[in-house]
Amino acid sequence: MRDRFAAVVAVLNRVGAAVACVALIALVLLITLQVICRRFLGAPIVFTDEVSGYLLVVVTFLSLGYALQRGDHIQVEILTGRVSARTLRRLRVGWCLVGLAFTGLLTVRTAQLAQDSARLEAFSITSQIPLAPIQAVAPLGFALLFLQLAAQLAEALRPPS
């Protein structure tokens, strides 16, 4: 059961990372187009800064779980490299529990923000883009991170072989 859960979480993380990659490509293309239009045509694209920020939100949040899955988050190995396997396992359980609590709270609070924006029909001032879909990316990304932490906790709790 744990292996199936970890496999499903891995697939969800890859989907999140793929969407983040598409957003990153769009971000690069938009900024490149902005530079070309401003430099050679003397006509900058007005909404570039705003949309670039939204794309950066997508890139950042949807890749959180994938980065943790691959071990690409910042790590401090000065301590973990010097402790026994048993102690390291206990540390992993501890930081997964703290991470789950914190990430769960962030998921709920950012989802509430997106719901409030949807209820109020909030739009950005500059480009009149609805804010709720952009804000919904944060709880989605935090949910992916939460699931990855849960998968890592399940792995850490597995008896050593």
Image (tube, helix red, strand yellow):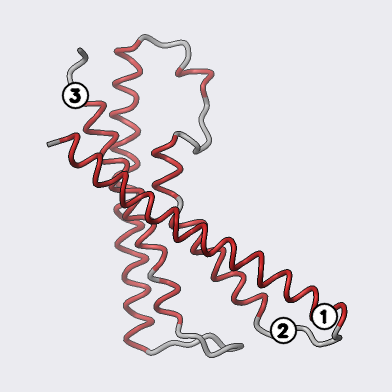
Relative to 107, say whether 75 is above or below. Answer: above
Distance from the alpha carbon under mark 1 to that under mark 2 = 8 Å
Amino acid type shown at disc 3: Arg
Amino acid type shown at disc 1: Arg
In primary-sequence order, the first of circles 1 and 2 is 1
Q: Quadrant of residue 109?
A: bottom left
Q: Is residue 51 left or right of residue 156?
A: right
Q: Who's the residue at 18% across and 39% down the image? A: 4
> Quadrant where the N terminus lies?
top left
Badge 3 or badge 2: first in the primary sequence:
2
The answer to whether the residue labelled 1 contacts the one labelled 2, judged by CB atoms less than 8 Å apart, is: yes
Q: Residues within 10 Å of mark 3 (few under 14, many from 20)?
A: few
Tell me the CA gap for discs 3 and 1: 57 Å
At 29% from the left edge and 13% from the top edge, which residue is drawn? Answer: 86
| Mark seen at residue 45 | 2
Residue at image mark 3: 158
Depth check, front residue: 35 or 83: 35
Q: Position of residue 113 (x, y in %)?
A: 37, 73
Q: Which quadrant does the C terminus fall into?
A: top left
Q: Nearer the viewer, residue 34 or 113?
A: 34
Judge left or right: residue 66 versus residue 143: right
Horizontal side of 23 relative to 136 (left or right) equals right
Counting residues from the start of the chain, the first of labels 3 and 1 encountered is 1
Instruction: Give the residue at mark 1.
Output: 38
Residue 24 in the image, given as x and y percentages of width and height: 57, 61
